[in-house]
Amino acid sequence: MSDAPTVPTSRTEADRPVRDAAVPAALAVTNLRVTRGDALVLDDVSFTLPRERFLAVIGPNGAGKSTLVQALLGLVRPDGGEVRVFDRAPRSEPRRIGYVPQLKTFDRSFPATALELVVSGARGRWPARITATERDAACAALERVGATRLRDRPLARLSGGELQRAFLARALVREPDLVILDEPATGVDFLAEHDLNHLLEGYQRDARATVLMVTHDLAAARHHASDVLVLNRTRIGFGPPERALTRACLEQAYGHVGHDHDLVLP
Amino acid sequence: MDALLEPLQYAFLQRALVGGAAIAMMTGLLGVFVVQRGLAFLGDGLAHASFGGIALGALVAYGVGGAGLLAQPLWVALPFTLAAALAIAWVRDRTDLSSDTAIGVFFAVAVALGVLFLSMIPPDANVVDVYHLLFGSILAVGPADLRIILVTAGAIVTLLVLAWGRLAYATFDADLAAADGLPVRLLDYGLFAVAAIAVVVSAQVVGIVLMAAYLVIPAAAARLAARSLVAMSVGAVAIGVTTTLVGLFASYAADVPSGAAIILLQASVFLVAALTARR
């Protein structure tokens, strides 16, 4: 099973993104390079993700995972290479993307209810008045993530897991073709990993959507993802979990692999 | 009752009340964004920049001898403060310096320039009353001032209402707003520019020393009671207008600087809101 690690020694034609004229890929990243100040954060990253796949992006802290997400969203400009989302430049069709940001950077002092948060996702503006149609759509999205009871709760009074559900509803309310999640935290007080993956798989199936999830959770990547990108500044491995999550790939990405890491190897 | 209403016959007080209400609406709406973006110090920086600008305007007015457009210090103070605001926004945007550092530098330079300019005007020239400028005065709103206040406040309130959904979204989270295609950087610069204009126009009534508090306290008090940003905005405007009208009236009745009367009232409202706010 692990006899064919995908650690690239030299790039071959097969690694390059293939463009299918009829059905463009959900994501096509070609030789992406991003610098921040003097630091090279992403270097020569290429991969192509067809539609309706579930991609897990893993890698150690500082591997450039969030920067990759920002490049896909059009929030950082590449210093080299190209990013295509549904065969268009990033930010061309923001309504087709549902984005769940990292919650640890979020300022909860903003006066808003969970309902307003979800409506902001549907509208692409902050709501002053909420129409009946918007309210129905937002309530349906909250119900989908099991958060109906949070509707009128202020953001400041949501637990981490509740806030995460609200943000997920915010992303799903616009019925996106692509859901991007940047490190949804799991564990104590957060949405149980099982719940989150179950919700995402359900939405993906119903809406025939594509999912990209940055995660630290290798078990989730193994069991739920159709594809895994192992990243550490550059592409370490890419492919189905059984090919990307090999000892060789993980050692190259994380340094050594030992029992003190939460790494489960095939 | 007649004794209470009698002062309303005075034209100067009528102008102060109408102008004050317009200013309060404008700064109340603006203050919500200043508070939620953590820019309280910006109000201070811009007020002090406007001190430099008004001082330069007064010097120019003295130079031209009280004739023409430049006899009104505002026309020099506006571009001066606007330039300072955009420079602060630019330093924030393009360097690693925090906005506090950027504001602190401009703050000091503008005050130093202002003192320098004022010292160049002979004390008996009577182009600017420094005491009124620093602490606010109900006598400050002349007929020409009132026209400027109404036009400026009308334009800024309209702009803020039209851009409210976008500004609020970018205030909530700049990355989410940018990912949804909003021009976040343009909104940042626009907010700073609008704040500069609002501060210059309000400074004569409220006083430069208390301008920052005037911008922040109504929004902060409304924040304590409001569950949504739109309720906070409505609350900030209501608190701002009420305290400004009552404060101006008290300023006349008790013969104290209007800025002090207004701010002390606003602080009382804030205190009540803080004591009664649900935890």
Image (cartoon, coloured by chain):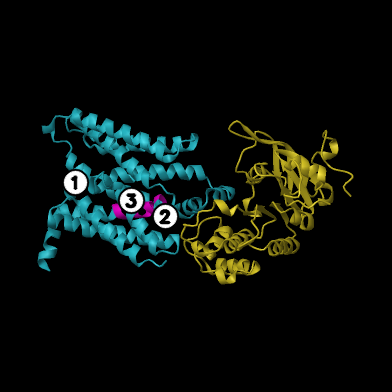
Q: Along the horizontal axis of the image, is A114 left or right of A235?
A: left
Q: Is residue A20 visible?
A: no
Disc sitting over residue B161 in the figure: 2
Q: Which chain carries label 3?
A: B
Which amino acid type corresponds to the residue marked 1 in the rendered image? Ala
Q: Mark 1 highlights which residue?
A: B140
In the picture, the quarter occupied by the C terminus of chain B is bottom left
- Chain A colour in the picture: yellow
Which amino acid type corresponds to the residue marked 3 in the rendered image? Leu
Q: Residue at x 57, y 68 (%)?
A: A133
Q: Residue at x 58, y 58 (%)?
A: A121
Which amino acid type corresponds to the residue marked 2 in the rendered image? Val
Crowd band around label 3 with a 10 angstrom C-alpha radius: few (<14), some (14–19), many (20+): many
Q: Is the magenta stretch mostly helix, strand or loop?
A: helix
Q: Quadrant of residue A39?
A: top right
Q: Are marks 1 and 3 on the same chain?
A: yes
Q: Which chain is cyan?
A: B
Task: Verify whether residue B40 appears in magenta.
Answer: no
Q: Quadrant of residue B267?
A: bottom left
Q: Mark 3 highlights which residue?
A: B215
Q: Along the horizontal axis of the image, is B106 left or right of A96?
A: left
Dot 1 or dot 3: first in sequence order is 1
Nearest to the observer: residue A260 or residue A128:
A260
Q: Which chain carries label 1?
A: B
